[in-house]
Structures are given as C-alpha cells and as structure tokens.
Image: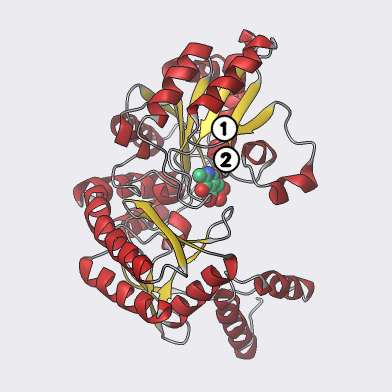
Amino acid sequence: KAELTPQEVEWLNQETISNFRNHVNPGFLEYRKSVTEQGQHAAIEWRASGPNTLIDTQGREYIDCLGGFGIFNVGHRHPTVVKAVERQLAKQPLHSQEMLDPLRALLAKLLADITPGDLQYCFFGNSGTEAVEAALKLAKAYQSPRGRSAFIATEGGFHGKSLGALSATSKPVFRQPFYPLVPGFSHVPFGDLAAMEARLKAHAEQGDPVAGVIVEPIQGEGGVIIPSDDYLPGLRRLCDEYGALLIFDEVQTGMGRTGKLFACQHSNTTPDILCLAKALGGGVMPVSATIASKKVFSVLFDNPFLHTTTFGGNPLACAAAIATINVMLEEDLASNSAEVGEYLLDGLKSLARQHPSLVAAVRGRGMLQAMEFHDNTLGYAFAKGMFDQGVLVAGTLINAKTIRVEPPLTLTRALVDKVLKRAKLVLD
Ligand code: PLP
C-alpha cells in the first residue's frame, strides 16, 4: 500500500497553494516544469464548504468565481447529484457502452426534451474534447458521401486539444507543434457573417464545399466574446444555403451558464449538432454529450461502430447528469444566472469605470463574464490579488488579457456584494 508521508503531503499542499497563486502568472509554467522534472504532482485538497465556497488545506475560505472552469453550475457537491451517484455506485458503477442501459436512455430523453428544435439523438463521452471530436466525425461521416470534407471555425475559438478538436481551436501556440493537423480546417473572424459567407462561397467555387461550421455561441476561452444578436441566425441561414452542417460547441456556454439553458436559445437558433460537457455532470462526474438531429445521427444508425468509446454514457455519469438536469430545472438556475449575473456584471462594470487605466472592458451574459485588462500583467496581478482576498478567478486560455468570472450559478446577491468589495480593494 503506497502512502505519502505527512511531510510529503504538507509539501504538496504548500506547493499547490503557491501553484494556484501563480496559476495566472507566467512563472507558473516554470514551476510546473520543475515539479514535473522531479516526477511529482502537486495536488490541493479543496473542500467544498457551500455551493459557492471552498476551503483550502489551511482552512482558508474562498468565494468560487471560477466554478472549476465552468463545471460547478449547480454549486459544489449538490446533495441531489452526490446522492444519485452514491446510489448508482452501490448498484453497478460501470459497464461498457455496448450494454443498453436505462439510465443512458433516460438521459438521452431528457436532453432531447431540454435542447432546442429537433436535436434528439445523443452520443455520450467523457469530456468536452470528446464531444467536439464526435461532432466533427459525425459531420464528416454525414457529409463525406456528399463530397464535403472542409470545416470552418472561428478565430479565438476554443474546442479542445485532441487532433480533431485542435484543428478547430485557433490559438497558434497550441497548434504549431502538431502541424500538419487534420486537413481542411480554416478560421474566419468570430462574429463576422460576411467573412463566413465569403469563405463558404470560396469553398463552393473551388469545388471543395464545406461539410461543417463549428462555433461557440459565445466565445469563452477567447475572452467571453458575445456576437451581435443576428450572428447565430445568420450562421444558420448561411449553412442552410451552402449545405454545411452547423455545430454549436456549448461545452462552456451550456447548462444555464449564460442565463438560458443553452446560449443558442438567446437567438432561437438550432444547430444540427450541439456539444455539451463540463457542467453536465454537476461537477461530480465527467460526462459529455454530442446531440444531433435524426437526419445527421442516422449515419450512426447505419453503422453504430463508426464511433464508440467504452466509458461513454456509463451509469455513474448518467446518474450524475440526470440529477444535474433535474436540479437545474427545479431550482431554475438559468434564471438565477441571468438575474444575479446581471447584478454582478453591473458591479464589475462600475468598478471598471472607476479604474479606466486598469480595466479596458467588462463583458458577460448570465454568469459567463470576463474583465479585460490593458495588459496581461495587470490581469495576473488582479487574479493574484483576488486569490489573496479569498476569491478564485483565473485567466482564459486564448485571450491573455482577460480574467474570467465564472461562478457556480447558485451565487447570491450577498456573495456578489462581498466579491465586489474585495475586487474594489484589489483594484484600489
Ligand atoms: N469546447 C469548449 C468551448 C471549451 O471551453 C472546452 C474547455 O474549456 C472544450 C471544448 C474542451 O473541453 P474539455 O477540457 O472537457 O476536454
């Protein structure tokens, strides 16, 4: 039985606290390298002390405005979700995807009910990346007999880092070591319908028509970029006109994050394929879903072995996701995200107005929010200051000047007041 000595545990805790302190700091990478070279992995035992608070190993409490990078939408350790998983654990924790399972069927049915339009069929996986990978493969399998293989994604978009997902992700430093990526992917500016149309048209004219367009309805890792209201409906129209499938990556925006269950519902736009993950498992289990219309999913009816994964839709993950969806609906967390989110956003905007030399912009919808600083160092300093004040925030993967504010949707006005007070202290 391998056990860490108390000294080793203490070392890990200390290192991890400083690791987190430096999380949004370039020094973090150096630190990570040295830890990896020593063959050690830092790990902090964060404990939930409430839906929106965490306690570190030293007993310090933090207000969570990071939400596990978007997984804790129903709050930390929601008792309904935890109980559902415990019940399932006591019965039959895991079996493979080939076993038909009533929980998986129930989850698929629930997702068909709550997603817009004719999105009715699901492929389950374990991460956002897998949800995107499945979406790209599904689109490719559907479009390949139609002579279509190209994909258009957007600049600033983030979709994961497996080879397919990375081909859609736009950040050069993530991509370059892996060139050539999957052929046929190109990027156009986000929010720009004219650029999308021009690219679709150019492909059609070159005899290489587009198979799919993949976008986040609101870019998360790109720095919380909200397109104009006509963008998603415009993409729907263009995809229909040019015969491309429309894929919405709602891995970060889904499950109430933006004030509606799905961000595409703000503009009543239904994609052909929708990707979900992160918050779907309630912050208790990893689970993802790639949800498609019958038309598109039919390629998997013909050959169900085209895309499979052993753990996809396992009973534990499904139990967590079913409970999470029920909690989201019963507690109407999407509405809380909209209402309390607006209160938080107003507060952050007012702080930004008081500090124009530091904060360049504050953006957000629901509880997907970001503060853009004039440069990276100011953002890092703010995040570190907030950590020291007992509030967790962090940077975004693509837009280095922005600090995300992404709390569990159970946030209250009283907690917002505390966050704003501490943010003011840091900025002042
Ligand atoms: N898609 C989007 C929009 C994301 O924000 C992320 C992760 O941040 C992913 C995909 C990848 O998800 P995962 O990290 O669960 O693989």
Provide the residue designation for mark 1: 134
Q: How busy is the neighbourhood of tag 2: few (under 14 within 10 Å), some, or many (20 plus)? A: many
Provide the residue designation for mark 2: 130
Residue 20 at what x, y percent from top left?
A: 55, 74
Residue 338 at what x, y percent from top left?
A: 25, 51
**SS of the residue under disc 1:** helix
The correct choice, above or below, for 287 with respect to 301 in the image is below
The answer to which of 282 and 34 lies nearer the viewer is 34
Image quarter in which the C terminus is found: bottom left
Residue at 48%, 39% in the rendered image:
216
**How far is mark 2 from mark 1, CA to CA?**
6 Å
**SS of the residue under disc 2:** helix
The answer to which of 381 and 114 lies nearer the viewer is 381
Label of residue 380 in the image: none
The quarter of the displayed image where residue 181 is located:
top right
Image quarter in which the N terminus is found: bottom right
Q: Is residue 412 left or right of residue 55?
A: left
| Residue sitting at the far bottom | 7
Residue at 61%, 22% in the rendered image:
199
